[in-house]
Amino acid sequence: MRTARSHGTRDLGRGAPERRPVSLRFDGWIAGLGTTSRTRLVLGHWARSPFGPFSDVMLERADGHRLLLAPTRRTAGFIAGTYGFDEVRVVPVRVGVAGNHWTVVAGALLDLTFTVGRRGALGVLLRAVPGPVCARPSYATLTGPAARLLLGVHTCGTAGAGRHEWYGAHDLRPVTAATARFEGRDLGSLAPVEPPVHFGFGSTPRTPCLVRVTTTVRAPDPARRSAGRQLD
């Protein structure tokens, strides 16, 4: 598991050393889907991260209200510092995977189930790229133009708190069916991610899908230390 790594400091001869950025790597899956109620949901299911394994859900309502559901104060604080939300709630987020069927339960707020289909040509192509290559920020930068052309998404950009972010995709499968209830209300059936979500510098693909991804966040060291003091 690769986690946050400090690159140390360099004395410039002026008293205070220069602090270099630190890189934080998250390895897992992102599912993005819409519903006929025009609620859009983005699940992050992270097998490896600087915070250990965890899952989170970003939800944007038809009126544009953006909500984060995260399992701990530390994960909620880091995600909210990287993306933009109108509301953050700390609740247990549990994910179950049985074959092609995924279930997500976020406290008493959200019940989501979805099914993924067979990967298409793009998914087959992504799986052919070695994992260590997909994990490099340079890979996300190189594949950015193709991702914008084929999927309408950005693979790299600036984030909150002076951070930069890169998404390296390893696999892509369509989401073929979904049901969702939020606070007891049925959100409707599966629909495109329309309008795009507005959490960060880019949205998920318009067509509902599940992406196997390595996300790298490069953060200024002082910001990371400050966030750690705030969240611990």
Image: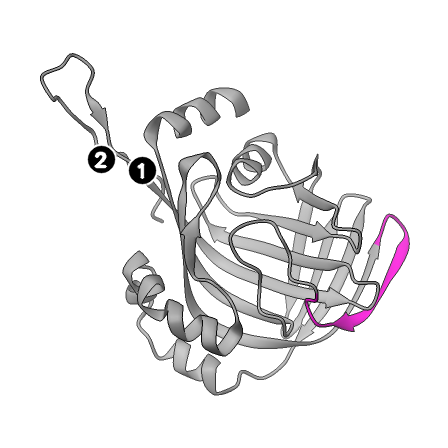
Which amino acid does the dot numbered 2 rest on? His
| Residue range of the region highlighted in magenta in the rendering | 182-194
- Which residue occupies 52% across, 21% down? 230
| Vertical placement of residue 224 versus 138, above or below | above
**Residue 226's disc number:** none
Residue placed furthest toward the top = 15
Pointers 1 and 2 in contact (CB under 8 A)?
yes
**Residue 7's disc number:** 2
Question: Marks 1 and 2, how far apart in space?
Answer: 7 Å
Q: Position of residue 48 (x, y in %)?
A: 45, 50
Residue 215 visible in rendering: no
- Which residue occupies 43% across, 67% down? 169
Which picture quadrant has residue 8? top left
> Can you identify the residue that label 1 sits on?
22
Secondary element type, mark 1? strand
Residue placed furthest toward the bottom = 121
Residue 161 visible in rendering: yes
Which amino acid does the dot numbered 1 rest on? Val
| Vertical placement of residue 9 versus 105, above or below | above
Crowding near the residue tagged with mark 2, few <14, some 14–19, many ≥20 C-alpha atoms within 10 Å: few
Residue 105 magenta:
no
Q: Position of residue 10 (x, y in %)?
A: 14, 26
Mark 2 or mark 1, which is nearer the start of the sequence?
2
| Vertical placement of residue 203 versus 54, above or below | below
- What is the basis of the colouring in this image? one colour
Q: Position of residue 93 (x, y in %)?
A: 67, 47
Which picture quadrant has residue 192? bottom right
- Which residue occupies 45% across, 34% down? 161
Residue 193 magenta:
yes
Q: Nearer the viewer, residue 57 or 147?
A: 147
Crowding near the residue tagged with mark 1, few <14, some 14–19, many ≥20 C-alpha atoms within 10 Å: many
Magenta region's main secondary structure? Answer: strand
